[in-house]
Image (tube, helix red, strand yellow):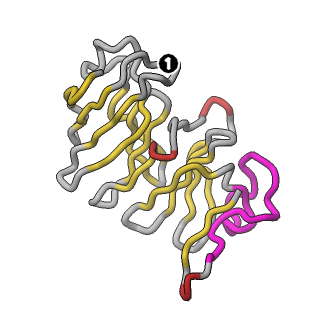
């Protein structure tokens, strides 16, 4: 339940959580990140201002550690406001410093103010022919194109595939198994 970075002389430096943080959940927000719970960190990404976003898998929280080392809950603390990428590759930093995440069945832009849905895969035209499209992994090219995959063995999606999403939210199917 900790986030580490590789520091000088190849020493690991504690950034959030720590061995003393033993319980799942979101607590000690607004305090130094080393005194707070990172909620079972399962993915991290950085924006251009060096804010670190953490996907906490224990309670499906989206947390942010600012450049001063203070942790904040962007989404979490209430059950109806969870954030749930289905894998550690469900949150990513784009080459331009924007942060994107896969929240259960949508592609979202992530900022310090919260998230904004770009594509809802349950109603979007790109995935309309799927029984269900459960986003699994995300990658962003230098030109801003976003690639999202789905796992056909997920228990939710029966057909694997990859879709390309442009920065404006329009997209196309690249591959469908």
Region rendered in magenta: 12-37
Image quadrant containing the N terminus: bottom right
Q: Residue at x 35, y 17 (%)?
A: 123
* Residue 140, magenta (yes or no): no
Q: Residue at x 69, y 42 (%)?
A: 58
What kind of secondary structure does the magenta stretch mostly adopt?
Answer: loop
Q: Is residue 89 left or right of residue 78?
A: left
Q: Residue at x 50, y 24 (%)?
A: 154
Q: Is residue 129 left or right of residue 87?
A: left
* Residue 21, magenta (yes or no): yes
Residue 118 image position (x, y, % from top left):
33, 35
Residue 4 image position (x, y, % from top left):
61, 68
**Res. 71 image quadrant:** bottom right
Residue 87 image position (x, y, % from top left):
51, 40
Q: How many marks?
A: 1
Image quadrant containing the C terminus: top left
Relative height, residue 140 to residue 66 (above, below): above
Camera-side residue of 108 and 137: 137
Q: Is residue 19 left or right of residue 107?
A: right
User: Which residue is situated farthest in the bottom direction here?
Assistant: 9
Relative height, residue 63 to residue 154 (above, below): below
For label 1, the residue is 156
- Tell me if mark 1 has few (under 14), some (14-19) or many (20+) residues whose alpha carbon lies within 10 angstroms of its own: few
Q: Tag 1's secondary structure?
A: loop
Residue 109 image position (x, y, % from top left):
38, 44
Q: Is residue 173 left or right of residue 58?
A: left
**Res. 84 image quadrant:** top right
Q: Residue at x 60, y 34 (%)?
A: 81
């Amino acid at each position: 339940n900790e986030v580490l970075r590789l520091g000088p002389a190849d020493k690991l430096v504690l950034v959030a959580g720590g061995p003393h943080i033993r319980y799942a959940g979101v607590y000690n927000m607004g305090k130094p990140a080393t005194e707070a719970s990172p909620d079972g960190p399962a993915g991290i990404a950085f924006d251009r201002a060096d804010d670190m976003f953490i996907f906490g898998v224990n309670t499906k929280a989206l947390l942010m550690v600012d450049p001063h080392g203070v942790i904040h809950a962007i989404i979490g603390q209430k059950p109806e406001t969870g954030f749930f990428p289905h894998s550690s590759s469900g949150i990513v930093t784009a080459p331009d410093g924007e942060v994107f995440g896969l929240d259960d069945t949508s592609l979202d832009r992530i900022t310090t103010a919260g998230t904004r849905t770009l594509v809802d895969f349950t109603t979007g035209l790109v995935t309309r022919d799927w029984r269900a499209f459960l986003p699994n992994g995300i990658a962003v090219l230098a030109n801003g194109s976003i690639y999202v995959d789905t796992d056909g063995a997920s228990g939710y999606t029966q057909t694997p595939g990859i879709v390309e999403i442009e920065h404006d939210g329009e997209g196309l199917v690249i591959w469908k198994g």
